Image (tube, rainbow, N blue to C red):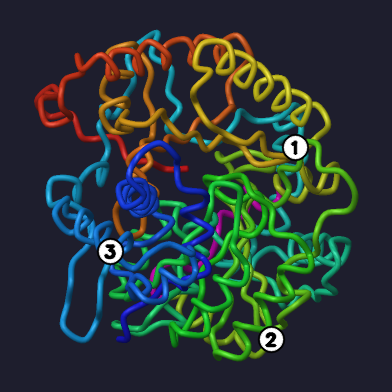
Amino acid sequence: MATPTVSAARTARLVGTLVPGRPAYQALADALRHAVADGRIAVGTRLPSERELTGALDVSRTTVTRAYEVLREAGYLASRRGSGSVATLPAASRRRGTGSLFPADPAEGVIDLTCAASRAPAGVIEAYERAVTRLPEFLCGAGYLTLGVPELREVIADRYAARGVPTEPDEVIVTSGAVAGLGVVLRALLGRGDRVVVENPTYPNTVDSLRRGGARLVPLAMDPDGWDVPEAARTVRAAGAAAAVLIPDFHNPTGALLAEDDRAVLARALRAAGTVPVVDETIAEVCLDHDGPLPRPFAAHDPRTISVGSSSKSHWGGLRTGWVRAPRTALPGLVEARVTTDLGAPVLEQLVLLELMRTSPGLTEERRQDLRASRDALVTTLRRVLPDLGFAVPAGGLSLWCELPDGVDATAVAVAAEDEGLLLAAGPRFSVAGGLDRWIRLPYVLDPATMTTAAERLARAVAVVADGAARPATSRRRPQGRPSRPLVA
């Protein structure tokens, strides 16, 4: 596999204007170190040559040479024969955040922000009652509806058509949630050792699924506010990947929304590379206050797209019901991959989702207002108690992607926050190739008063770490026999 590269132009954009009042080489080294640590330059990526970066930054060759030397000494750059200067991480930071810090069941009074999912909306009980009245008509069969309840497939297809992609019911398979659906798609598309482009940061369960399947991951670096589309297209063209797993709709964890024109650009690059887009649309319906029409689904720009959706964010995670939308030609392979592990989603829950989607295909207005209120409470409190915390307020999705002050480690903050009664997901958990040590994800899925309390507890945890009083993550001791808590959403 060819070593991935970052262009001189993107590197210059990441560096920005060098901080005055200090040696230029040191300012350049610090800027590049932050870019590697935060995942914007993925570990294993070849940096531009000294000559290329000298021209892109309009600095002296000596400045770049000395900056690269500083990075090598600090463990952020390695020189490899035939590969030039490659981004790496100090050995001590490579395993940070790779697992959970938390017990399986939070104690009373603990605020759990490791899961970006909300409560069930009003009307779920009534939907179950109506679904039960429909259930007898399915009891005469075996109950293994491998493709799904036909009426639910029709409603899902109609929703895609309303969003801008004409879809027939026979292009939809109902699955046992998005994670199960993604697993079906990956088994159908990939063989062990195949390359897959994955956004960095991204949803952790996606990375875990790909690695268990033996895929070789090619990070597509994202900025805090979304995609550098020209660089993303360049990464896709150079990767030679079988598939690209993307979250263009209120991306998890950044909340970014890929614009319509940018979807077209990225789709062209994927077609040219022969790379199949696998698009996670789990959060596509969680629009809170986006101005104007939403971008059409990625499949509108590339008909080869395989889309994975779910009711977990738009309706309720307890339904454990999702779907895959794919071209007809891909359906036989998907069904074959599915039946090896899963013969069909529960019929009753499919009927419940059918009732809910007929009432509201996405978020109900009540849930939208609730999420806005919780987001706004979190944002207001963070700006008051943690003014140095960096974040953009997303127009949709379920979480803030927050940059901690310089020198404050996210994993240490997560440990200190647990002592304050707050469970957090540190940035390294969302990383494809290490880094993201100064980032945390804060879901705003609890009520406004609880979000306010969570922000105040976070501020105390950050203060503890900034003062150097935090215990290292390795010092935490779990009660005997208590499993670690997985990050599930």
Say above or below: 179 vs 307. Answer: above
**Would you say residue 394 sits in the magenta stretch?**
no
Q: Position of residue 91 (x, y in %)?
A: 12, 52
Q: Secondary structure at mark 2?
A: helix
Q: Is residue 45 left or right of residue 304?
A: left
Q: CB atoms at circles 3 and 2 under 8 Å apart?
A: no
Question: Depth check: 482 or 273 in front?
Answer: 273
User: Of callouts 3 and 1, which one flags the residue occurring earlier in the amino acid sequence?
Assistant: 3
Query: Which residue, given by chain and number where applicable, does mark 1 sit on?
Result: 127
Query: Which residue, given by chain and number where applicable, does mark 2 sit on?
Result: 328
Say above or below: 35 vs 181. Answer: above
Q: Label 2 vs label 1: CA separation?
A: 31 Å
Quadrant containing the N terminus is: bottom left
Which picture quadrant has residue 291?
A: top right
Q: Position of residue 24 (x, y in %)?
A: 36, 49
Q: Which residues are magenta?
A: 340-351
**Would you say residue 350 sits in the magenta stretch?**
yes
Nearer to us of marks 2 and 1 is 2
Q: Which mark is residue 87?
A: 3
- Which residue is found at the position 60% from the left and 48% from the top? 225
- Report the amino acid beneath label 2: Arg
Q: Position of residue 420 (x, y in %)?
A: 33, 11
